[in-house]
Amino acid sequence: MTERIEQIRARMAAAAGRAGRDVGDILLLGVTKTVVPELVDEALQAGIGTFGENKIQEAKAKIPLVSSRARWHFIGHLQSNKARDAVQLFDVIHSVDSVKLAEEIDKWAERAGKTQPVLLEVNLAGEASKHGMKPEDVPAALERIQQLARLEVRGLMTVPPYAEEAEKVRPYFRQLRELRDQLGLRELSMGMSHDFEMAIEEGATIIRVGSALFGERKKHEPAD
């Protein structure tokens, strides 16, 4: 685990150097989908302090079993009826893809007496299989969401189309950075195990790394 983390951090530093950036400004988020709590604790001991979960039910079972020192970000699709759990479990929610969802999160944050940091998810390629706002809809949505008392919009998040050649996703990362800059926000959550260096070169402040950190996920065996 320690060796993997050192390798990832070295690649992060090299990518930041190519872009003239400070690697200290980039958060390595360990994606723990299907990862057992013991491995999450091992990563925590090895220096990863913040983790990302994709599913509320898995997070509800896992987070209580991991050291309370860990910080948690929600990075999967969030249904409105799971907003209450998300507010209770997560420090940051990356995947706000509508004003309606933002209003629901704001309602539960108010009841919990907390301010909930969020990112707005943008579907840059218009893929039907993915969630997120159209880029052209983000400014108006942001204006409405920023009026909600209990939400703090910190930035933008995207999942670009998958490409074997990471260079092919560079335009999407660049587009998200340009949109972020137009809106005057700070955070950019983009880049995963196969393309995080490209994302860093284009301005990512949060990279979401799972398989490069924990190894390839095991496919569940079919039930007998």
Image: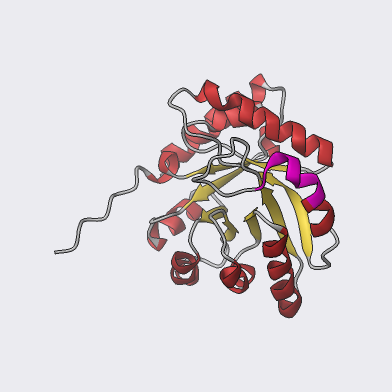
Question: Can you give x and y, in whole percent of width and height, for residue 107 in the image?
Answer: 73, 74
Q: Main secondary structure of the magenta part?
A: helix
| Residue 13 seen from this side | no
In this view, the residue in front, 154 or 47, is 154
Q: Quadrant of residue 186?
A: top right
Colour option used? secondary structure
Q: Quadrant of residue 12?
A: top right
Q: Please tell me whether residue 137 belongs to the stretch shown in magenta.
A: yes
Q: Is residue 195 left or right of residue 101?
A: left
Residue extent of the magenta highlight: 133-140
Q: Is residue 21 depicted above or below 36 in this figure? A: above
Q: What residue occupies the far left of the structure in this picture? A: 224
Q: What residue occupies the far bottom of the structure in this picture? A: 111
Q: Dividing the image into 4 quarters, which one contains the N terminus? A: top left
Identify the residue at image location x=72%, y=33%: 177
Give the tally of numbered discs. Answer: 0
Identify the residue at image location x=69%, y=68%: 105
| Residue 54 seen from this side | yes
Q: Dividing the image into 4 quarters, which one contains the C terminus? A: bottom left
Question: Can you give x and y, in whole percent of width and height, for residue 87 in the image?
Answer: 64, 69
Q: Please tell me whether residue 108 belongs to the stretch shown in magenta.
A: no
